[in-house]
Image (cartoon, rainbow, N blue to C red):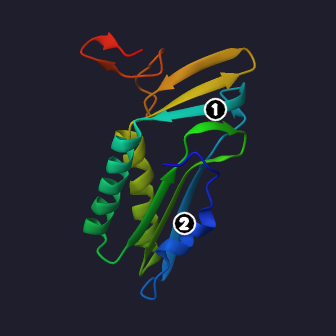
Amino acid sequence: MTEKEIDFQELVRQVIHPRSGAVATFLGTVRELTNGKRTLFLEYEAYVEMAEKKMRQIGDEIQEQFPESNVAIVHRIGRLDISDIAVAIAVSTPHRQEAFAACRYAIERIKEMVPIWKKEHWEDGSYWVGDQLETTCYPQGKPILGGQEND
């Protein structure tokens, strides 16, 4: 997790290895239009300690599935403007098919299990999107624990 601009080239350098024949990357960026609505900027918040633990778990899962892989993942928090990189993933493996599969696995698992919340700021207001899969709304920006919303 970082509050600074993501240097994805540094991420790629972290995973390149002499046994690697492929490096796949994924960059999640802030888009301007969502369903015709103009976004001005986003804010990401996270339970940082747990988010970092879950991202390490994802790296471990990838290395179990693809034993010769190297994985680097970083997610940004704070205010992000249009086109800023929100999440970056780099995976190296001996062959491209595994690199693509591992990279996709990483972003799907991040969306599924890493406690990060996004607030959209549009031209006509703002809204906490909720979880990464956008299936649960958190109007207060936090998950509901024991039926009570966090402040």
Q: Quadrant of residue 63?
A: bottom left
49 sits to left or right of 79: left
SS label for mark 2: helix
Tell me which corner region of the image, top left, top right, bottom left or bottom right, holds residue 40: top right
Per the rendering, the mark at residue 94 is: none
Decide: is 88 above or below 150: below
Q: Give the structural element (helix, strand or loop) at label 1.
A: strand
Residue 144 x/y as whole percent:
33, 18
Q: For mark 2, what is the residue?
A: 11
Residue visible at 41% across and 55% down in the picture: 106
Residue at screen point 46% across, 58% down? 73
Instruction: Kindly identify which residue carries mark 1.
Output: 42
Residue 76 position within the rendered picture, expressed as x and y whole percent measured from the top left = 55, 45
| Viewer-proximal residue among 127 and 45 | 45
Q: How many marks?
A: 2
Q: Amino acid at mark 1?
A: Leu
